[in-house]
Image (cartoon, helix red, strand yellow):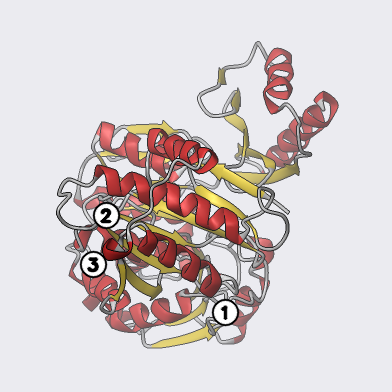
Amino acid sequence: MALIKSISGIRGTIGGKPGETLSPIDIVKFTAAYGSILCENREDKTVPARIVLGRDGRISGDMVSALVSNTLVGLGVEVIDLGYSTTPTVEIATKLEGATGGVILTASHNPKEWNALKLLNSEGEFIDAAVGAEVLRRAEAGDIQFAAVEKLGKIVAAGDYLQKHIDLVLEYPLINRDAIAAKGYKVVVDCINSTGALVVPQLLKALGVSEVIVLHGDNSGRFAHNPEPLPQHLTALSNEVVKQNADFGIAVDPDVDRLCFVCEDGSMFGEEYTLVAVADYVLQHRKGNTVSNMSSTKALKEITLKAGGEYFPSAVGEVNVVQRMKDVQAVIGGEGNGGIIVPDFHYGRDALIGIALFLSHFAGFKKGLKSFRGNYPDYFISKNKIELETGLDVGLIFEKIQKKYKNNPINTEDGLKIEFDTDWVHLRTSNTEPIIRIYAESSFETTANNIANRLMQDIREAI
């Protein structure tokens, strides 16, 4: 049972006691706090606040959506309900509708018992830390004023924003549909029993992909495997790519903001290299800077410098990456977990524009995806985690480790990042789970694993 309040939204497990889980009471409390802020801060007080609402395919989605939408109605809000949607689609719709904000009901890569409220501002971007802190304050204080009966809000259905999202991708200047269609690709897609099933196959067909084979293609929310698109969870996709003699495979997470590819031999292209490949393509057409979070591969920095741009790291979290991208006017950015952010499309991780850009790049290559992967540096990131017990002082743990490695270059902007010559390890608490993440990168898999294991042992000793 868990309830996590962070820059990534209000996230928790369904079922259990209020205050300890994402219970109906907590859903209403945090929704009311967020909605009341938007109602107060809207520019034109003569018209109601308008909030876009969308959800992924989770089992709890109907219940959470009803609680959120009717709480907002109680505040006097006009709710633009997209129904089943993706995180990037809600972000796009919020901006296009001129809405006051947006709410996405998804726990992203977390298992089916989780759900979350991801909160957006009027730009369709995640709310900043100051607004997030005010949401938490109001929720705990009960500092909320609901509307009188004559001023209750309403729920209105929106148009088909999934199709609108696809249309916008096709219109993006760097998308080369003709080149993609000419390749006659056969593709296997793992839609993880969520809203990717409603949009990813349709996008691929619109891009001219000849044959699309869908795995886990219902929208039941009963995920066929752990929904985080990591290699150990994608064995069925790998096997199907080989069995079908497909050109490649694609996997997304339940809310379609993360993206990874599988090569024709069933091996992983590497989720870290989704952003690297897309950035390479964008930088060939637009000179400029790039950004990724500091848990991402250094390969992005290398291709950026080679293209004549500058690379800038950020703290982990989409809101942090977006802010750094704005600060340095980056032409492309994202996160090494397969999150692509194309700033002149919209400032949010978006697997759909990521697919189209990746395929536009790959279509210009004569050989298979395995060979295409060879264009990029071959670094390995060992990704690990340690579960946290309630009440553990992570700051004290990190202080002990920092003292142990005081002779190494250390960055404390986001947790603890320690450099070892050309290798590094990053320790940080997760925004989405009660865990410490331990990521280590090296040119050699065994070295990366050894560094990660050494630091995990340090953490255990510190605990």
> Separation of disc 3 and disc 1 at Cα?
25 Å
Frontmost of labels 2 and 3 is 2
Q: Label 1: how many residues lie within 10 Å, few (<14), some (14-19) or many (20+)?
A: many
Q: Which badge, 3 or 1, is on the more N-terminal residue?
A: 3
Residue, disc 3: 175
Frontmost of labels 3 and 1 is 3
> Separation of disc 2 and disc 1 at Cα?
31 Å
Element on which disc 2 rests: loop
Type of amino acid under label 1:
Val
Q: What residue is rendered at 31% in x and 48% in y?
A: 38
Viewer can see residue 181: yes
Q: Residue furthest front?
A: 149
- Whole-percent x and y of residue 68? 46, 63
Q: What residue is rendered at 52% in x and 75% in y?
A: 62
Picture disc at residue 241: 1
Type of amino acid under label 3:
Ile
- Whole-percent x and y of residue 61? 53, 71
Element on which disc 1 rests: helix
Instruction: Return the residue nearer the eye: 365 or 205.
Output: 205
| Number of numbered discs overlaid on the protein picture | 3
Quarter holding the C terminus?
top right
Instruction: Return the residue nearer the eye: 393 or 409.
Output: 393
Judge left or right: residue 268 versus residue 169. right
